[in-house]
Amino acid sequence: MGPASARCLAVGLLAAVAVVPLQSTALREFLIAVVGVLSVVAIVVGVRVHRPVRRAPWYLLAAGVGCWALGDVLWAVVEHVLGSDAFPSVADYAYVLAYPVLAWGLALLSRPAGRTAGRDALLDALIVATTLGLVLWVFFIAPSWTDPEGTLLERVVGVAYPVGDVVLVTQLVRLMNARRRTPALVLLGAGFGLVLVADLLFQAGAYLPVLAADMGLIDPLWIAPYACWAAAALHPSMARAGDEPSGTALPLTVRRVAFLAGVSLVLPALVLIEAVLGVPLHSVEVMVAALPLIGFVLLRMLGLVHRMSQQARDLAHLAETDFLTGLENGRRLTARIEDALGGPDAGAPARGAALLLVGVERFAEINETLGLRTGDELLRAVAGRLVVAADADGVVARLGGEAFGVLLPGVRSGTRAVERAIDIRELFAEPFRLGEVTVSVDIAIGVALAPDDAADAGALLQRADVALSAARERRDLVARYAQQMETGGALTPQLMSELTSAMAENQVVVHFQPQVEISTGRVVGVEALVRWQHPEHGMLGPLAFVPAAERTGLIRALTLHVLDRTLAQAALWRAGGRTIPVSVNLSVRNLLDPHFVNDVRRALERHQIPATQLELEVTETMAMLDPARSLEVLGALDELGVMLSVDDYGTGYSSLAYLTRLPVRRLKIDRSFVAGLLDDDASAAIVRSTVELARHLGLAVVAEGVEDDATLLALRDMGCYAAQGFGLGRPTSADRIPAMLDAIETRVPGLVRERIPVQRTA
């Protein structure tokens, strides 16, 4: 509660307490009138300060409260100055006028935003109004109206008070149900509730001699509502009190059901009490009130049944829908697969289908680095693109995490299924624009056929998952299930559980492969290549654990481990009198990690290696994942003095012109192009044009996968800067590197100085 609102409520309640011991009736009436006037002022001030969007209801409430305050002033004047006790007096006209004005203000505040919530709130209000109206009719309205001694005007004014109470209660119940119960609304409702109690006690004075003897006992109940209304208007939540609906429909909670049931039982309870007391029964009145009450309750129950039916349909839909993407979920996809396999009826013919299990590569890194919101946006974007790719004949479902399933009913050819998978992958060549971030992602696809690969949905999903694991090990990232795949990745879970401890125990080691400057035959550096000397499974190559480390998020720790071991070895060579530049491959996580530049700086300082002696390699796909962030990190590394190069050039989707925007100095042509250099015209043209264009752009080209001297000489003739491959030196342990480098620098310089023409094998 705001300070002004709290102070106002406290002062008002103190005034309500202080009025009790006052002996002077005139002083009491004066204090009540003053509090009423101050309440009107507070409501107007609250509107001016908090500026609610809907001001008319609050001004009407101020006017209604003003009528009440005016009535208090007139009552004090008429009774204590003029000495008149006539009924109705001019004060009664002001009091009666307050009821429709206040009801109008409450009606505007409770005006519903949704049809369902508004209908339910109105029905609840009518149920309460019918019951309360019957009670007031029996005890107050009927006796006042049938009083033979009263004039018509006296009877009309006497009836106006309880009727006004019914109208106010109706609007109040509607307001509390149609709007969220903010502090301002609670205070507003409390004020009207106190007015109702005070009104009923005042009118009950005609039946209770105790009240009639000292009506001053209820004077605090006239002051407290003024305090509540003023506090409501001064509370900050009043600005939105009329703009926040309670929901699309009122929840029928146990408390609400009990309340409505209790209200409905008032009618039979009234007849029962009259029968027990032996007073005349109001059977006709009860029957007349029961007819609309039953109708209102019936409409409320019909609305509840309709809503429950709708909720059942919604729950059934949610049970088969992924909440994030809106796609079908695994449960629904399983049912569709069973249907494609013939359904539960064993005699039904199997129509067959292809299941494509799609995994978003490096999603964990994107999610952790760019945030959960970006990750969720990416999943929704991927889902949309898969729906387009599946076309009208396919069904797309999200199976959890970054995994999606694409079911192609009627596709029973493995060749056709793989073609569809390749078509889907091509759609992901275009980056995703997610707010202010551009993200490039790749997908891997595992393909399994029903019923060829599995006879039930569970087995088909499992085999598609096996194919997906195999696809992630391939360059094209697409794999059709084959039985021999079942054991191919069996070690992966075990290896991932052991990787952290293996790094701590130095089982993860680094081998090095030399890079040779072609024009001179001089070794210009070595590339660090990770290996795992496993105590049970022997020496494991990177394909056995690096892709899985990428997927599980362990790649960051692995990259930093390799960097530290590589720089430590470079320091040993440097201490031995031999300076050998070293290069380390990066993960995309490193390019998205804001702390990576500091990690590199600390590693260089720890091992006392100049930044110019370190080369860091990134793939073009990594650099395109988030170009803005990649450019920022690579720029910081370049300022640090580290050599940057692009690895596996030609396997991604970027152009050489795009890569020149990055601060890279070397370009490594992928081995798939170099391997066909001598016998494939297309590969030779690609390598030659890349070398020439890179030279004009100021980039040095390193060719990977050089297996023989003829390929080396062909690269020399093309003007390629450097080469590495088995033909020059295989990856080996650090202790063998000095001898290998000596052997290379003894043999290769003489080879590259020869001007022997290279024969094409055609």
Image: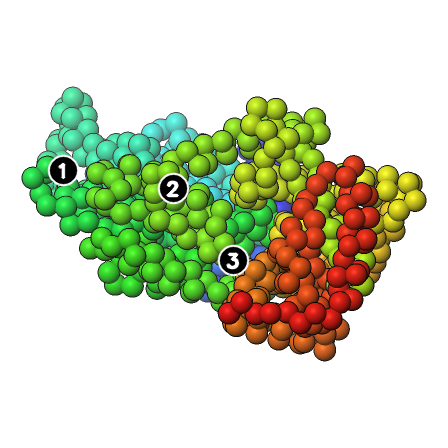
Q: Secondary structure at mark 1?
A: loop
In this view, the residue in front, 223 or 686, is: 686
Q: Quadrant of the N terminus?
A: top right
Say which label, 1 or 2, has the lower sequence index. 1
For residue 532, side relative to residue 562 (left or right) = left
Where residue 295 appears, as percent x and y from the top left, is: 14, 46
Residue 341 x, y percent position in the rendering: 18, 44
Q: In the figure, is residue 606 to the left or right of 18? A: right
Local secondary structure at mark 2? helix
Residue type at numbered disc 1: Pro
Res 334 quadrant in image: top left
- Measuring 62% from the left and 52% from the top, which residue is drawn there? 588
Q: Residue furthest top?
A: 276
Q: Earlier in the sequence, mark 3 or mark 1?
A: 1
Q: Which mark is residue 344?
A: 1
Evaluate if marks 1 and 2 touch, with contact meaning CB atoms under 8 Å apart: no
Between 456 and 697, the one lying in front of the other is 697
Distance from the alpha carbon under mark 3 to that under mark 1? 39 Å
Find residue 465 and name its label.
2
- Which is nearer the N-term, disc 3 or disc 2? 3
Q: Amino acid at mark 2?
A: Asp
**Image-based side of 719 in relation to 388, left or right:** right
Q: Residues within 10 Å of mark 3 (few under 14, many from 20)?
A: many
